[in-house]
Amino acid sequence: IDLVAKLDGKEVEGGTANGISYEVGSNRMIDGLDAALEGMKVGESKTFNTQLVGMKEGDTGEVTVTLQAVKKRELPDLNDEFAKLASEFETLDELKSDSRERLSRLKAMEQGAQARDNLLKHLLDTVEILVPEQLVKDEVDDHLEKENRLEDETHRKEVTDEVTRSVRADFLLDSIVKAEEVQVTEAELTEYLIRTAARYGMSPDQFAQQLSQAGQIAALMAEVARTKALAVVLERVKIKDASGREVDLSKLAPKPAAEEKSE
């Protein structure tokens, strides 16, 4: 398509574009374009009013669109050739089976994450956990100081609520770690480090070095132990989905990072 934008009858500087590829229905350019394109034929032009973007953003002007060509997206046939082209599998049945397995595992992981969140919320709501006020205040002050918002009382209350919940959760999980004698193995620490490093776009070695320099290795081990502690409690409860069916706990954990990498 070609586009020409005008304001008060005059062409807008930078408001002309030719040979643009645009997917009808995507609604990703300017308001009114999709409606204008409906029913147009090649070579036809149509003018509509809309709010301009760019240097004249916010002003209402006229945009003329000219349809130069129409292309239709054609989807490939779902067959063994497609499977070979789109994946490492030789047949479409193998690709479908793998896709079903991945979706099933993803759904189970999402259910597991939601179950852990709900379980922790339930524990925090039902168990009395006292936390030192000074500890909370120090963390809140540190947070607000970094944001340069020490005098913002409304924000202070929000941060205080968040910090209080976080500290209560840590105290609760630490007590479970102690009661259940939860231990963190080197393999578990490495696995957690690999996954966390990936979220930050860093190599495991770089991430480990930064943690070591910041003296955060012990904090990382505590975080892994708390995660394991919650998993211990989770194994002792029944988890049901929205339809009332029990969720298979064995599917809640993701595959090891090494296995995912090999895929």
Image: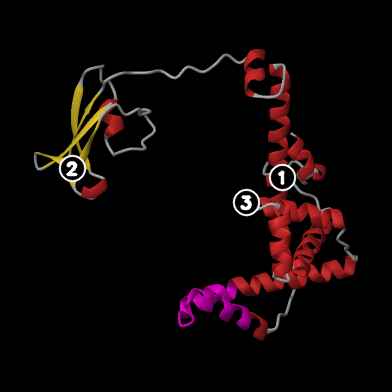
Q: Amino acid at mark 1?
A: Met
Is 263 a magenta residue? no
Q: Amino acid at mark 3?
A: Gly
Instruction: Tell me: residue 78, above or below residue 157.
Output: above
Q: Earlier in the sequence, mark 2 or mark 3?
A: 2
Q: Residue furthest left?
A: 9
Q: Position of residue 57 (x, y in %)?
A: 24, 49
Depth check, mark 3 against mark 1: the one in front is 3
Give the residue pinned by disc 3: 201
Q: Residues within 10 Å of mark 2 (few under 14, many from 20)?
A: few
Q: Is label 1 in contact with label 2 (beta carbons under 8 Å)?
A: no
Give the distance between the C-alpha atoms of the residues marked 3 and 1, in whole angstroms.
Answer: 22 Å
Give the residue pinned by disc 1: 109
Residue at 51% across, 18% down: 75
Q: Which mark is residue 231?
A: none
Q: Which mark is residue 13?
A: 2
Residue at 89% across, 65% down: 180
Tell me which segment is drawn in magenta: 137-161
Depth check, mark 1 against mark 2: the one in front is 2
* Secondary structure category for the residue under label 3: loop
Colouring style:
secondary structure
Name the side, left or right, on which 53 lies relative to 146: left
